[in-house]
Image (cartoon, coloured by chain):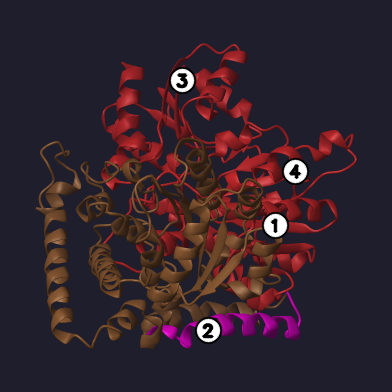
Chain colours: A red, B brown
Amino acid sequence: MRSLSFSQAIDDALAQAMAADPRIVVLGEDIPLLRRELLVRFGPQRVRATPISESAFVGAAVAAAMGGLRPVVEVYMADFLGVCLDALLNHAAKVETFSGAQWTAPVVLRVACGGGYGDAGQHEQALWGWLAHIPGLTVVAPSTPADAGGLLLAALQQDGPVIYLEHKLLSESWLDFLGSGGRRTVTFDVPAAGAKGTVPSTWRPVPIGRAATVRKGGDVTLVSVGVGVHRALEAAEVLAAEGVRAGVLDLRTVSPLDRAAVCDAVAQTGRLLVVDEDYEGFGLSGELAAVVLEAGVSFQYARVCTRTTIPYARHLEEQVLPSSDRICAAARQLCS
Amino acid sequence: MAPDLWSLYALMLRSRLLEEGIAALWRDGLISGEMHLGTGEEAIVAGVVSQLRAGDAMALDHRGTAPLLMRGVDPVLIVRELLGLPDGLCAGRGGHMHLYSRQHLAASSGIVGAAGPAACGFALAAQHLNPGAIAVAFFGEGAMNAGMLLEALNLAAVWKLPVLFVCKDDDWSITTRSQSVTGGDLHERARGLGVPPINVDGRDVGDVWKAAQAAIARARAGQGPTWLHARCVHLEGHLLGFQLLRTLRQPLRELPKMSLRLTRSLLQPGGGGLGERLAGLLQVMAALAATMRDPRGDAANDPVRRARASLQAEPDRLRELEEQIGQELADVLARSLARAPAKAPADGPGEVLA
């Protein structure tokens, strides 16, 4: 075992996979600088810069995957997927069905997402629920370095398109580039257990579609993904001191959803509290309620999500993104 | 008509001093996120914006401060927006990449290339509602590889939209040399889409002004769009705290962190052959070397200093103007930092600034 930061873990797992499989290529804007360690090991044929042309290079990666490559395409931020949505919505997601299951597009999109550093809602959206809405796309969002490396390996073994979301608040390199710019005069509420942690010396895949129970508790089930998992754990600690036993389930994969894990946990506590950094309306939080209802489980329900466009000012942003305070308040009400 | 270099220099100096103040606030941690300055492109912005009139629109990129200031937006509102205050230009909710002024028909976007379609839309509205008015799109040469901008050029050409497309070219697409990811010639590209190109020295405000005057007159007369290509050097790189410039300015602090991991990866078994690895290393070195050949030290690349040099024949007038603008901007920054109004939340940044 060794300790790595979140983004180092992803790069490390990616390097292991690239050494084993020459079909894996990495491409995206500024990749020669951002992934310079991969560049000097695997060379410029396999690690290449793109122009600022998302619709061209993401669209090309989808077809390159159909042609036999295993592209890992980086998109600076989930928000920028708006520029190249067609490649995902109308192509990557459709190949398998339209071809009568004779063909797939095994492309991995590595995309930075999430807020908490004051960049406002055109550069801080989570969007995993919005992406998971599309049948045919697999969407993962790890919350620890160990899961980050393991899920990347699993994504590269998946026989279809995977959106791999890398939360910027967990990534010291993204936070340095976009948040602090080398300053020591700004601080961010970075969950320590997500930013750095022990990882295996040799990576093994973490199965896609499998949630993890990260805290047991019989009174209420907190279900989350990404940074929200850490906010939920903070809240569970506070609630424990008040006598409320909150369990925390880390989905790890948004689509396909681990329905069994969610339903089992909620059946035991009778209470579901969803913590979701993505938008509240028409998204993951409502989907989780529907899944548990469909299973015939009787439960009480609340959610702490992002309701509006994320504002720029740090103190307003803090109020909009799910926080442990909001989670505690919702849990108290649910358990009262 | 000849450009009034005195008033253009005044616009540029105001912008430079304001942005230097903004940089200081950013370094002090009072401005969050990515802060992209327009230092180095003032001649381009001044040469164009000084010729706009009521009813003209601006579609801005992520460097909106200079155009908004020069268009007449109150700089105190701009700075208070960057500080995230409730009485900022956009109530503290937009921030520096998302500055809007409805009154000035000015809208920003942090999405590369988005200024193209937006300018077309403003121009279409002007064609219907306010003939003779125009729209300006500001963007970098990196955006010339974004599909939406190329589509916008074509749209403007076929609809003869009154748009001035202003390409501020510093040959850097964030950390990538634009030449290395751009095929063909940008002038031919614009011409091929039906938009006549003009080339100017973006460091020379008089040169920009003259070219913009002709293009704006053409647009107002209903003769369609023009693509203005202006080269410049961004004095602070892509954004404040830009990693490549940090490496250049503080090599002892930044290089060891970088080189240890690079060396380890270079020597790691498994992966490319020696030739591939060396080619990769050469690319990393080339990016650093390109930054080392820093064009920022050359006064000829600073448009404000160049404009000033042309006015030195009248030293008294120059000194008087600079003193006046220096005082004005000191006042702006002082007012920007004044205590936030009572409606600011108790734990908001208003207290921090008190």
The mark closer to the camera, 2 or 4, is: 2
In space, the residues marked 3 and 4 are separated at their CA atoms by 39 Å
Tell me which numbered mark, 1 or 3, is placed earlier along the sequence.
Answer: 1
Relative to B175, is B52 above or below?
A: above
Please tell me in which quadrant of the rendered image residue B252 appears: bottom left
Of badges 1 and 3, nearer the viewer stands 1
- Circle on res. A92: 4
Query: Which amino acid lies under the numbered mark 4 shown in the image of this protein?
Result: Ala
Q: Nearer the viewer, residue B24 or A145?
A: B24
Q: Report whether mark 1 lies on the same chain as mark 3.
A: yes
Subunit of label 4: A
> CB under 8 Å between callouts 4 and 1?
no
Q: Is residue B152 visible?
A: yes
Q: Which residue is mark 3?
A: A269
Name the N-terminal-most of marks 3 and 4: 4
* Amino acid residing under circle 1: Phe
Give the SS element for disc 1: helix
Q: CA distance from mark 3 to mark 2?
A: 60 Å
Q: How many C-alpha atoms fall within 10 Å of the one at disc 1: few (<14), some, or many (≥20)?
A: many
- The residue at which mark 1 appears reads as A57
Residue at image mark 2: B290
Q: Mark 3: which amino acid?
A: Thr
In the image: residue A251, left or right of residue A218: right
Q: What stretch of residues is rendered in magenta?
A: B271-296
